[in-house]
Amino acid sequence: MWKPKSLIDTLVPIYILHVLFCHGVIQHPNINKSKINYSFLWSIVSTILYCACFISVFWLRINPSWYSEGPKVTYMILIIAVFFTMNVNSVVSWIYKNEILILNSKLMKSDELLKNLGVSINIQREFALSMKFAVGWFIYSFYINAVAIIWYDKSFGLLNVFMTVFTFHHGFHVNCIVDLTFFLLIIHMKARFEGINKFLSDLFNLQSKNLLQNVEAYHKWAISRQTNFENDFTLTFRNIKRIHLELKILCNEIMKIYGFSISLMILTMFFLVIVQIFNIYTAIINTEVKLSDKSLQLFSMSSWVLIALLKFFSVNYACAEAINEWNKTGEIIHMLEIDSEDSKFQREIQKFSIQILQNPLKFTPCGFLDLDYYFIKDFAGSVMAELVLLIQTTSSDNSSSQRKD
């Protein structure tokens, strides 16, 4: 049975989804160049075919009177926005295909260096996480399509509804895979920082018990981490410091590659959440609609809001947790410096501390905003402000119409 050897290997289930559904380019470093070229050709051809299908369904199969209603107008606007985002994501994967391969190669080398230094990362746990998210993607796709099929006007015919939903929602599923790839890359960065922090914490415990200079104790500790015994601990610490900075630089490269896609995702989710919550409010206060139809509308719109918020929160959660692990490294080495009596080792700690202070870890897509827990709060505040403004504007317009009547 195949087992992943690095964190990049754990992303194989997601990369398979990219090839099968995402019009993406194969990104694994162990794939030979000819297969990468074939995947690139497949990506272009499949994107062109999908665009042709989308346009034909949009213009030929949908009755214009169907999406003349309020919720359906916003639904079609959202579908067009998602279609645009999907094509942008495909083009971005073409533009950055070489950079992604180089990035993954660098990450694999970093993982090998961390392993040689004794930094342990649970590869099997991360692989299980990737498998769970791949299965979750299928569940998400089935659920959102089922909701739409129930919501669509059955006068189109069941076959027509299936074709329409499959075509329109393909963009949602593609974009979800792209966002999922970014999410897992950042989660893996968090796992690497977490492994480094665990390594440094163990060293702090050795130092606090005065075992760092004890050759036998240090030897046992090195063997427990399946690394070569190195009597000069300062050299090991210097290598950890170098890899820690390299990982931060690789985080910047990930953000550079996926920044535009994440920015579009946030804008789309912002629009979706505001419009759908407003539609939910409108449906609740509308007394002219049957209870069964109202329940169906509320179920459908609530599902969209829930999925949008879940995706938005997951991306920000991953970035915030990675930043927390990065900052935690500074706290651990500060404790090491306080307890250390070796002047040479103290100088290395001071250099490490300055390195962290001068290179703060931030995830800033396109330089517009910082992804973290604070942005979740700002996002919620902006949504609420826009909803209040929208409700007040609609209420005043209705009041003016009633006075004229």
Image: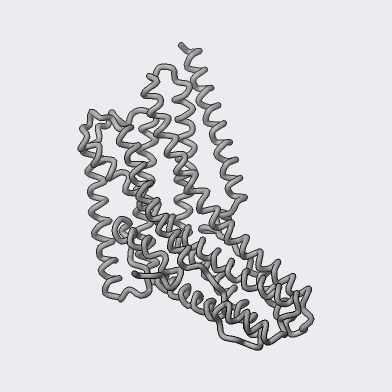
Q: Tell me: residue 78, above or below residue 7.
A: above
**Residue 67: percent from the left, percent from the top?**
32, 31
Which corner quadrant of the image does residue 69 belong to? top left
- Is any atom of residue 285 visible in this view? yes
Q: Residue at x 42, y 30 (%)?
A: 298
Residue 179: x and y in percent read: 44, 55
Vertically, is 273 above or below 213?
above
Question: Taking 279 as reference, is 9 above or below it?
Answer: below
Placement of 26 over or under 274, stated as above or below: below
Q: Is residue 255 visible to the viewer in this orientation of the structure?
A: no
Q: Residue at x 37, y 53 (%)?
A: 135
Q: Residue furthest top?
A: 405
For the point 55% across and 26% down, the residue is 392
Left or right, 396 with reference to 55: right
Residue 335, horizontal then vertical, whole percent: 74, 70
Q: Is residue 362 left or right of residue 92?
A: right
